[in-house]
Image: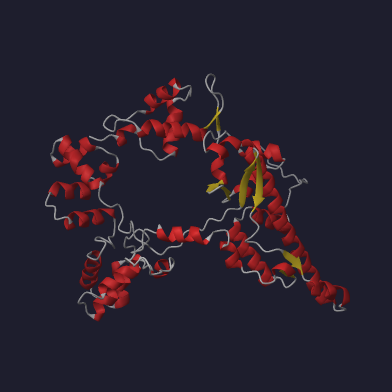
Amino acid sequence: MELQQQLGAKQVPIMTHAQVKSLAILQMPILDLQAEVRKELEENPLLELSEAQEHFDFDAELHRTYSYKELVQLAEESTYCNYDDAGADEYQDPFSKIQTAKTLKQQLCAQLLELSLDVKQVRLCNYIIESIDSRGFFTGDLHDISDQLGAEQGEVLQALAVVQGLSPVGVASRNLKEYLRLQLTHSNTQEEKLFFIVTHCLELLAENKVKEIAKKIGAKVEETADYCRRIKALNPFPAKGFFTGEQTELVIPDAFLTEENGVWSVIINERPIPRLRVSRIYKTLLKSSADTAEKEYVKVNMQKAVAFINQIEQRKHTLQKILAALAEMQTEYFKTARNLKPMTLKDIAQQVDLHESTISRAIRRKYVMIQSNVLCVKDMFSSKVDFDMGPGPVSSADVKKEIERLLASEDKKNPLSDQVISERLNETGLAISRRTVAKYREAMRIRSSSKRRLF
């Protein structure tokens, strides 16, 4: 067989830098877009705030959508602050508690000061505390600590034991098994079978294989099931319930949906993003300057500034168009928070005459506020399940809810199998196969019936 090379011309679409930037801006949520606006204002001298917004405060505008009353309520509902009893007439700043809330690591370091430790022990303990992850587990290397701080291995292990004895007990455990054993030890239990299960049967416990565990420890199934329940009741990670100090993503609605006389309106949230314009000074310079290099610099940056302003406007119009179509299709869901209609990217793309990939980018990490609820736009898209008989097309989200409803009322000692769930759904008119039930159950991270069974 003879191989031959042939030359030929082929058209391949290549996106310009401006098109790439436009798509990037389209998929930015408000916080990212605000950061991008800040960056462009710093880098492009031809871009400036409009006259009406020359004193625009990015941070202040970002939070103006939340009333003081709502922020006070958030502060009062905080779970990691310890509130002091104050007199009825004594005013307390509701935000002062949040400002002084200590992280888990800070609390551990404060506890060290109450112990009688020498300087070297304190250094070792602090180093270990700084090596704790967000779950409260120790992720460092004891040998590295020994080398870096010039300590014996036994001294490092002793420091680790000191930290693990702080509150919460078991913090800085090196793995789940060690943490569970420390909890059992702290509870003063003397039952060796509990320690054996934690040390040697944790994988079987995760699979709910109670009978196999019973054989290994030489106990009855009922007794073993009780051991398993006690272990499952233990804390899964040391930092649970503690403030770790890690930043969580702030969700700002990209749009507001309002209803009047049965008609839904979409209002894009423009408040956190200032209005921009091209600098008039540089416009004049472009006309009057005789310096070629200077004129070229101004021209290039002017094109960038104009393109950036247009890209922000295009993002707004695209998002407005998509959300308006979405509101039209999901009117009943917005009113009742039930009956989410099957809706795919293709459905919206056809309605607004845009490509599916554009829809996907536009809804990425976007949120809308409806009355007092903030919803993720992506969660409103759901595949369609067709039935030969019964209610007709139903969203996969509604099918999942129906599966959850059945599982919520099942007998935990005799949980429903996928086949039984399929039969129950068929009785209600939802003709779902056992395989489809299994697929949805796994997508919802619900274990199989054998692993849900309580003995």
Along the viewing direction, whichever of 381 and 155 lies nearer the viewer: 381
Relative vertical location of residue 52 with respect to residue 15 in this rendering, above or below: below
The furthest residue to the front: 89
Up-down relation of residue 35 to residue 351 (above or below): below
Quarter of image, res 136 = bottom left
> What residue is drawn where x is 28% and y is 54%?
176
Name the side, left or right, on which 227 lies relative to 145.
left
- Of 56 and 390, which appears nearest the observer? 56
Position of 232 relative to 301 (above/below): above
Q: Residue at x 37, y 33 (%)?
A: 407
Residue 215: x %, y % from top left: 16, 37
Q: Position of residue 264 (x, y in %)?
A: 65, 42
Name the residue rendered at 74%, 48% in the picture: 12
Q: Position of residue 446 (x, y in %)?
A: 38, 38
Image height of 34 relative to 280, above or below: above
Q: Is residue 131 left or right of residue 391?
A: left
